[in-house]
Image (spheres, helix red, strand yellow):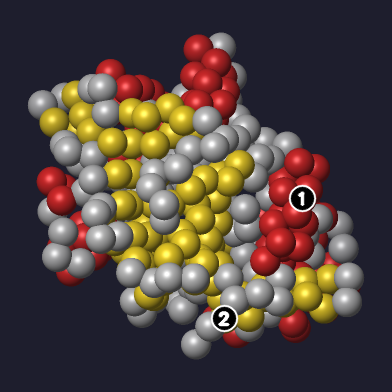
Amino acid sequence: MRKLTIGDVTITSIIERDGPWRAPEAMFPKAAAAPGLLAERLKEVEPETFDAASGKMVITYQTYVVRTPHHTILVDTCTGEDKGYPAPMDFPKQPWLDGLRAEGLAFEDIDYVLCTHLHIDHSGWNTVLRDGRWVPTFPRAKYVFHKREYAAWEETTKAAVERPGGGGNVFRFNCEPVVAAGQALLVDDDFQLDDRITLEPTPGHSPCHCCVHIRSGGQHAVITGDLMHHALQVHQPDWSTVFCWDPAEAETSRRRFFGSVADTDTRVLPIHFPNPSVGRVEAQGDRFRWRYMR
């Protein structure tokens, strides 16, 4: 993704992996149940988003680097290394480290880490393994977790209940050590980092998934985490994923968000959309459509 400028804020991307990843039928139960509709929707989405040869969606794992005049912020931290996760999450992680260096950044340069939610692929670089212990990767950073998101995964982990995408060792490896180190900020719905960065709860995919709003100089961008994983979900908002905590609530959050940004100049930055990553939501009658900003 080329550098995006929002007033006096810049946004760039660190990619951990990209390319064909998962068939839509395996990701979206409603798509699997409606092959004819899926075929129609695949004709609508832009070619970067689907690899026809493999029949798989093109999915990117990335972190957004947000630089304001006062702070350097990472939004979501991919899957991280040394976590011991099985395939397919065991892909090489060196590209993320190389990308951080390419941005001219060291671990010590990060002021804040904002996690849209606490799934495996959004919190992994929160911690690294040092002398057999998980410790915060970014020694100077404060990590922003929504308190309801944190509490839900804490309860699930204590009860030894496995939920798709999070809990278990994800929470123990990626979240608990940050709180133990005193580097976590557990925040409410109205959290505002400064006059440029705010959160918006968009629950459903996870207990209190949040979007990150960036406003400066009369411009507006939103990092949407996993509010949608693929452009298909813009065209078909009722297609929630097999990883969603509450599929119906996830759909409600998508529709509300799309309605608020459609046909505006808001730049939308999902975590998993491939290059060029940033786009706009357009209204199309009673439906929505994704368009990349090229």
| Residue 62 drawn above or below residue 205 | below
| Residue 165 coordinates in the image, percent (x, y) | 54, 39
Residue sticking out furthest to the bottom: 294
Task: Report if residue 232 is visible in the image.
Answer: no
Q: Indicate left or right for 86 with 73 as reference.
A: right
C-alpha distance separating marks 1 and 2: 22 Å
Q: Residue at x 24, y 54 (%)?
A: 70
Position in image of residue 147 (x %, y %): 50, 26
Q: Are marks 1 and 2 in contact (CB under 8 Å)?
A: no
Residue 95 in picture, x, y percent from top left: 25, 63
- Give the class, few, some or many, for how many residues have Cα within 10 Å of label 2's Cα (few <14, many ≥20): some
- Work out whether mark 1 precedes mark 2 in sequence or the reverse, and give the earlier one: 1
Quadrant of res 13: bottom left
Residue at the image point whose x is 50% and y is 66% from the top: 221
Q: Nearer the viewer, residue 78 or 73?
A: 73
**Disc number at residue 292?**
2
Instruction: Tell whether 50 sits left or right of 87.
Output: right
Seen at 55% across and 16% down, the residue is: 155
Q: Is residue 16 above or below residue 288?
A: above
Image quadrant occupied by the N terminus:
bottom left
Three-letter code, disc 1: Glu
Relative image position of residue 102 (x, y in whole percent): 18, 69
Assign a secondary structure to mark 2: strand
Q: Which residue is mark 1?
A: 251
Amino acid on which the number 2 mark rests in the picture: Tyr
